[in-house]
Image: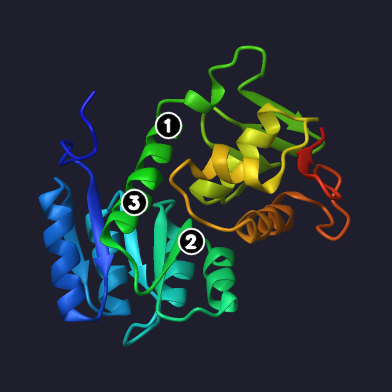
Amino acid sequence: MLSLKENTVNKILIVEDDSTLLDALRYNFSKEGYAVVTADDGIQALEVARAEKPDAIVLDVMLPGIDGFDVCRILRKEMLVPILMLTAKVDEVDRVVGLELGADDYLTKPFGLRELMARVRALLRRVEMLKSNELSHDESVPSSFRVADLEIDLARHRVSRGESIIELSHREFELLAFLVRNRGQVFSRDVLLERVWGYDYAGDTRTVDVHVRWLRQKIEDDPAFPRHLLTVRGSGYKFEA
């Protein structure tokens, strides 16, 4: 199997209005073997994403036209491409807003190029795992099953309620799939970061809380009183059928 560095099929959309940084990121991602497309404002970002169908998007928050939050919100309704947001602000609210809008990861400026590249590689690896159905290889766990009126199809990367498809980001689906495959077991936030986000993910445990909260809003009848995605005080989270 080709490594991500060798596989020029992976197309990255970089959205950044700082021309110097944009040029640097374009050069370095191209040097690593990625096909790179770019945009320097929010409207152009939407146009390029729709036309080019990138494998991952590096998206700055502060953009002319429409900002990165709106771009993320719009694209998340249209496609499941993994999105990593860049923010110049250290305010936790910005990071949480980005995650709640559907971003899969975030990085605060200034950042190290090696860390950014590692984050993007991690996003692409997780997508490839989903495509190859590595999340459903354990034959002791059915690839598709129902919980009340909720159907979770691990093999097809799909969650639905009745005739309605519930749109999840890649990271949301991975988190749900991991907990479903290990239902009844309690996992700490640190373990979930390690197992779902990957060893090279340098986030904090509040990231897990944000994704759990958003999953509850999508899959629970009453997110305030969840029946399936449960908090075990002082320990972490578990999924109950």
Q: Which residue is mark 3?
A: 120
38 or 18, nearer to the observer? 18
Q: Residues within 10 Å of mark 1 (few under 14, many from 20)?
A: few
What percent of the width, then of the height, locates residue 35?
15, 51
What percent of the width, then of the height, locates residue 219?
72, 49
Instruction: Identify the amino acid type marked 3.
Output: Val
239 or 201, nearer to the observer? 201
Q: Which element is circle 2 on?
A: loop
Instruction: Single out the mark in the foreground, 3 or 1.
Output: 3
Query: Could one spot residue 54 in this view of the protein?
Result: yes
Q: Which residue is mark 1?
A: 129
Q: Which residue is mark 2?
A: 103
The residue located at (84%, 51%) in the rendering is 226
Q: Quadrant of the N terminus?
A: top left
N-term-proximal mark, 3 vs 1: 3
Q: Residues within 10 Å of mark 3 (few under 14, many from 20)?
A: many
**Measured Cα–Cα span from mark 2 to mark 1:** 19 Å
Most extreme residue toward the bottom is 64
Most extreme residue toward the top is 139
Q: Is residue 11 above or below residue 73?
A: above
Q: Is residue 55 above or below residue 142?
A: below
Instruction: Identify the amino acid type marked 2.
Output: Ala
Q: Quadrant of the C terminus?
A: top right
**Measured Cα–Cα span from mark 2 to mark 3:** 13 Å
In-image side of 40 versus 42 (left or right): left
The residue located at (22%, 50%) in the rendering is 11
Verify CB contact (< 8 Å) between mark 3 and mark 1. no
Instruction: Single out the mark in the foreground, 2 or 3.
Output: 3
